Image (tube, helix red, strand yellow):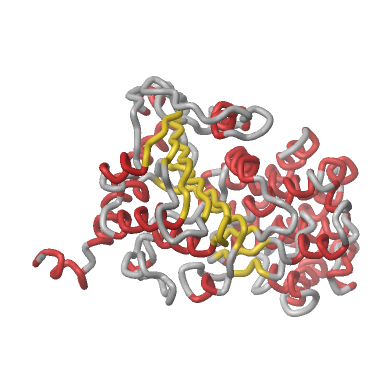
């Protein structure tokens, strides 16, 4: 999120939630309500109201009062879900308001209308919307953290993987679109806002460069709003399940950036994919997402994937997946992320960086591991993740302008180590590699906020549950008898 005007507006918008408490509005209802209204206002401010039928534009709300206003708003939500452009219909499908008091709707409309939109446009309305999503994610009462990856981490991954004009960028678990928006921003910053590109390539970037899926309807709605407000109108970012037939239809990509959901498929279900050979019999979603992403990479394609620790050490399908992945892709880098980043999911995480090989085997020769976790402060509300936290890792990784020298192993006392393919094979394909003994507990001792302390406890409990689930996935009722007999 950019400057002070944006931050102030987000704070003001969030503060309006208090007004609506007597209307029975929850945090999540409020954000949904606010995003409908904010989106309509932003279309007016950006000159994109041609996407809407004239009678259902922002002026229709500001010109009414009382019951007439509430009735018109309800009609607007209904009509926009069935008329207008395809993108608008997706956003407003099944939309309805939880507001019951016309005075509260008038309060929201009036407050939004009076914001400093001139200054907000100078800083970027897309950034304003993302700021609201970020605020929603950090408010634990909203329950939205599962959809939000810290922007400092996203921007680091984008800087290292460097998306280019003409490339297809995919996120099979797109959430609210953070990775796709960041990739678009990176490309535009280096292409004079795309104006330096030929007309056909500008159209490709706007409509075809980004592909993805989001399973949760509410998150998909926020995703489509976010993309449209950043000038992206993709034909291939849809609602659906990447672990089902929808995922097969995504096609291949030059670059994949993703933070797939943690846990197991509901009811212990398996992926429904005719092309899966490694994870077809496991309910572990992360393993299945990895198989999808490796298969979806074009030869020479690159990926940055956020994954929990259990993917690095799980036996059975997990071990088979890692072996296959390192055969067909060069898994050149693993970043061990610090604690406290994904408290909503409650697990410790990593970023895997890889490049799909053109050969069928032997792609990974060595894996470089950067430990950003051991001996580091625990992150949380009192210590948010920042861009500068990744500076040393980015320099070691080799990103310009700092990464001009070859990679250097820092030894047992450093954070940056190289492990050969033979080293990893000797570990039973276990990639959960740590060597620095300054433990996470030392970082947790410095926590002060009760919320952060409670979240640290949740991390340990959730990691234990993740390990149990990963083990249970390997001993499902239909296979347990066979494995026991063996």
User: Which residue is at 47% across, 30% downward?
Assistant: 372
Q: In x, y percent, where is residue 420?
A: 37, 39
Residue 445, compared with residue 346, is above or below; it is above
Residue at the farthest left position: 485
User: Which residue is at 72% across, 66% downward?
Assistant: 208
User: In the displayed structure, does residue 428 sit left or right of residue 262?
Assistant: left
Q: In x, y percent, where is residue 116?
A: 86, 42
User: Which residue is at 80% across, 71% downward?
Assistant: 72
Viewer-nearest residue: 6 or 71: 6
Q: In x, y percent, where is residue 195?
A: 88, 53
User: In the displayed structure, does residue 290 sit left or right of residue 466?
Assistant: right
User: In the displayed structure, does residue 30 sit left or right of residue 418?
Assistant: right
Viewer-nearest residue: 228 or 317: 317
Question: Is residue 451 something one can see in this rendering?
Answer: no
Q: Which quadrant of the rendered structure holds the N terminus?
A: top right
User: Which residue is at 46% across, 25% downward?
Assistant: 377
Viewer-nearest residue: 102 or 191: 191
Q: Which quadrant of the rendered structure holds the C terminus?
A: bottom left
Q: Quadrant of residue 391?
A: top right
Looking at the rendered structure, the number of numbered marks drawn on it comes to 0
Q: In x, y percent, where is residue 109?
A: 80, 55
Residue at the farthest bottom position: 82
Q: Quadrant of residue 437?
A: top left
Question: Is residue 241 something one can see in this rendering?
Answer: yes
């Amino acid at each position: 999120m950019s400057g002070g005007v944006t931050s102030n507006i987000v704070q003001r918008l969030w503060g309006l939630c208090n007004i609506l408490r007597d209307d029975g509005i929850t945090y999540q209802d409020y954000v949904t309500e606010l995003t409908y209204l904010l989106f309509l206002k932003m279309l007016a401010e950006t000159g994109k109201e041609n996407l809407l039928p004239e009678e259902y534009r922002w002026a229709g709300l500001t010109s009414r009062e009382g019951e007439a206003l509430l009735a018109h708003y309800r009609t607007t939500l209904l009509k926009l879900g069935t008329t207008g452009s395809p993108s608008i219909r997706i956003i407003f499908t099944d939309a309805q308001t939880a507001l019951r008091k016309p005075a509260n709707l008038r309060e929201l409309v009036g407050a939004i209308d009076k914001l400093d939109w001139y200054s907000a446009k100078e800083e970027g309305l897309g950034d304003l919307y993302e700021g609201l999503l970020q605020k929603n994610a950090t408010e634990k009462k909203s329950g939205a953290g599962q959809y939000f990856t810290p922007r400092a981490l996203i921007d680091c991954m984008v800087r290292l993987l460097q998306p280019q004009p003409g490339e297809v960028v995919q996120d099979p678990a797109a959430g609210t679109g953070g990775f796709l928006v960041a990739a678009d921003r990176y490309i535009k910053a280096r292409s004079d806002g795309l104006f330096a590109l030929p007309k056909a390539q500008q159209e490709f970037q706007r409509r075809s460069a980004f592909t993805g899926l989001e399973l949760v309807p509410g998150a998909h709605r926020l995703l489509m709003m976010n993309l449209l407000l950043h000038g992206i109108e993709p034909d291939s970012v849809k609602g659906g399940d990447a672990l089902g037939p929808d995922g097969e239809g995504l096609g291949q990509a030059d670059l994949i950036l993703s933070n797939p959901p943690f846990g197991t498929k509901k009811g212990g279900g398996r992926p429904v994919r005719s092309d899966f050979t490694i994870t077809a019999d496991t309910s572990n979603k992360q393993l299945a997402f990895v198989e999808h992403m490796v298969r979806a990479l074009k030869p020479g394609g690159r990926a940055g994937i956020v994954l929990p620790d259990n993917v690095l050490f799980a036996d059975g399908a997990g071990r088979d997946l890692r072996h296959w992945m390192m055969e067909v892709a060069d898994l050149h880098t693993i970043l061990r992320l610090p604690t406290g980043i994904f408290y909503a999911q409650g697990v410790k995480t990593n970023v895997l960086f890889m490049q799909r090989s053109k050969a069928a085997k032997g792609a990974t020769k060595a894996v470089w591991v950067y430990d950003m976790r051991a001996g580091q402060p625990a992150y949380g509300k009192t210590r948010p993740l920042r861009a500068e936290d990744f500076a040393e890792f980015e320099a070691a990784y080799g990103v310009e302008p700092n990464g001009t020298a070859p990679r250097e192993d820092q030894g047992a006392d450093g954070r940056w180590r190289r492990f050969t393919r033979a080293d990893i094979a000797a570990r039973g394909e276990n990639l959960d590699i740590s060597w620095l003994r300054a433990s996470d507990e030392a970082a947790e001792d410095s926590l002060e906020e009760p919320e952060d302390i409670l979240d640290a406890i949740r991390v340990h409990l959730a990691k234990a549950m993740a390990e149990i689930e990963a083990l249970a996935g390997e001993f499902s009722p239909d296979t347990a008898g066979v494995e026991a007999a063996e």
